[in-house]
Image (tube, grey):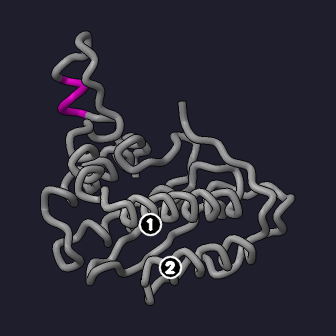
Amino acid sequence: MPYHLTTKKTWDETIRDLDETFRLWKVKTWFVEPMRPPRKMNQSHSPTERIVTMRYTKDDHEVVLVSGSQERAHDNLRALYLAVERMRLIDLAGLTDLVRTAYAQLPPAGQTTHPDSTASAASNPDPYAVLGVNRSDSLEAIERVWRAKLWGAHPDHGGSQEQTAPLNAAMDAIRRERKL
């Protein structure tokens, strides 16, 4: 079941919470895109408007997180904040390596390890799940998420060819499906 969040926190309140979390985590370089939400908090946002990208540098490694699955940009920003705050607390508890090892053993998004799954499903994961986008999202919104994830997975930014290949394959499959 996908995570769903509707926050009452304003954009500025969440930015202040992020600033405090990053200060406590000793992260000096971070930013969020867009800088301001596209519309007022109580208005719904289009699939493109709701996407929020966060970049930060921790221990000389740049991290790029993208959230667009919530209905509003405010909610996606809050989801990113909650994820980063939990990561900080895991780091503070000295559990980073344990959690990293556990996550490394999980199948990629969109793949199943259910005994009834076919080899085909494992070798051809759902491209939308790989990118973490919805089928109803516009191609522009999907490409924005793809570019952000690709940037963070690129070998020039600490990633590898093994990390970029599934992202590119997923974007190619979506483009073919939409015949662009």
Q: Would residue 156 be counted in the magenta stretch?
A: no
Disc 2 target residue: 24
Q: Secondary structure at mark 2?
A: helix
Say whether residue 108 is visible: yes
- Tell me which segment is drawn in magenta: 120-124
Report the amino acid beneath label 2: Leu
Quarter of the figure with residue 63 = bottom left
Disc 1 target residue: 88
The residue at the point 70 percent across, 79 percent down is 36
Distance Cα–Cα, label 2 vs label 1: 8 Å
Side (left or right) of 48 relative to 155: right
**Near-viewer residue (148 or 94):** 94
**Near-viewer residue (6 or 142):** 6
Quarter of the figure with residue 29 = bottom left
Report the amino acid beneath label 1: Arg
* Image marks 2 and 1: residues in contact by CB distance under 8 Å: yes
